[in-house]
Image (cartoon, rainbow, N blue to C red):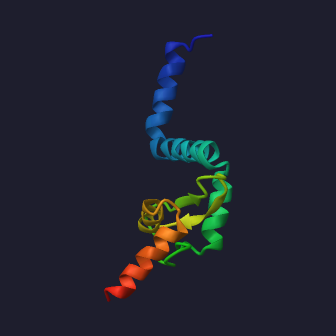
Amino acid sequence: MAATEAQKAASRRYYWKNRSTVLAKLRAQDRTDYLTRRYGISLEDYQQMYVAQEGRCAVCAGAVSGERMCVDHNHVTGKVRALLCRMCNKSLGGFGDSVERLQAAIDYLKRHQ
């Protein structure tokens, strides 16, 4: 059943009166859908991980404020490991999750201190 013009007008008025709340709910739903689809976790799971890590990256322990933390996962099994800051997530991704490549980079840095 199609909405009447009066219903559409009421809906527009509600949206503009409560715009920030409506948009926040939509963003939270989008984030929940993304986390579930991509990693198999809920927004609540993500928030529990964030609290358990005290808002800090699991690698560098840097506090992450004002930006979302990245959900780190095993690319073979899909298992979620922890939350990381963007830099640590990019760095691990750059090494292809290879312990050997990461160790080689550590050895390189030690040789060239």
Q: Residue at x 67, y 48 (%)?
A: 40
Residue under the image location 39 percent in, 86 percent down: 110
Question: With respect to residue 32, does 94 lie above or below?
Answer: below
Q: Quadrant of the N terminus?
A: top right
In this rendering, position of residue 37 left or right of residue 66: right
Q: Quadrant of residue 37?
A: top right
**Residue 63 visible within the image:** no
Q: Is residue 76 above or below residue 54?
A: above
Single out the residue that lies furthest toward the left. 112
Residue 5 placement (x, y as % from top left): 49, 14
Q: Tell me where residue 45 sits by quadrant.
A: bottom right
Q: In the figure, is residue 17 to the left or right of 32?
A: left
The C terminus is located in which quarter?
bottom left
Q: Position of residue 17 (x, y in %)?
A: 46, 39
Does residue 89 appear in the picture of this structure?
Answer: yes
Q: Is residue 111 above or below residue 61?
A: below
Residue 69: image location, x then y, percent: 50, 62
Q: Nearer the viewer, residue 101 or 1?
A: 101
* Residue 111 coordinates in the image, percent (x, y): 35, 86
Q: Is residue 102 left or right of residue 43?
A: left
In this view, which residue lies farthest toward the bottom? 113
Q: Nearer the viewer, residue 81 or 101?
A: 101
